Amino acid sequence: MGEEMNTTKVEKVEAATTEEQAGTPDTVKEEAPEKKYTDADLDRIIARKIAAERKRMSKMFNDEQQSELEERERNVLRRELKADAKDALIESGLPTSLADILKYDSKEEYESSLKTVISAFRDAVGQEIKNSFRGQTPRRGNPSASGDAIRDVFSPNAR
C-alpha cells in the first residue's frame, strides 16, 4: 500500500510537467522574451562604451608618457645642476665631494643649498684654523726655570 501512494504521487508530478511542457497559448506568450533593444541600439551602446574605454586608455597612456618625460627632464636638470655645483666648488677652492649634499630639485633650492654649504664649510675651516693657531697658553710659574735655558745659550761662556 505504501508503494502505491508513492507511485501515484510520481504519476501526478509527471502529468503536471507534461501539461506544462505542452503549454497553453497563454503560457507561450509569457515565455517568449520581448525585444527591448534593436541591433542598431546595441551597436550604438557598444560603440559608445568602446569609445569611452579608448578615451580612458588614451588618457592613461598619455599621462604615463608625460610622467616619464617629466622624470627624464628632472634627471637631466639634476645632472646639469650637479655639474654646475662641482664647477662652483672648484672655483671657490672647496672639495667637489660637497656636491653630494646639495639639493637639486630646482634651481632656487640648488643655489640656496650651495650658499649654505659654502658658508658652513668656510666657517668650520676658519674655526679650525683659529683653534690650531691658538696653541697653549703660557703658564705662570718660575720664570727662571724656563729662562735659564735661553740665558745659557746666549751667555759668553757657552761659546
Image: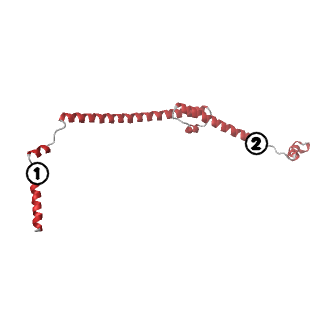
Among numbered discs 2 and 1, the one appearing first in the sequence:
1
Residue at 14%, 44% (x, y): give it: 30
The answer to whether mark 2 and mark 1 are in CB contact below 8 A is no
Say what amino acid the circle numbered 2 marks: Gly
Occupied quadrant, residue 3: bottom left
Left or right, 87 with reference to 38: right
Residue 53 in percent (x, y) is at 30, 36
Q: Which residue in the structure is indicated by mark 2?
A: 135
Of residues 132 and 14, which is closer to you in this image?
A: 14
Spot occupied by residue 35 in the image (x, y as percentages of width and height): 16, 38
Residue 36, position as x, y percentages in the image: 18, 38
- For image coordinates 47% across by 34% down, the residue present is 74
Judge whether 142 appears above or below 50 on screen: below
Vertical relation: 10 (above or below) 33: below
In-front residue for pair 133/106: 106
Mark number, residue 20: 1
Image quadrant holding the C terminus, namely: top right
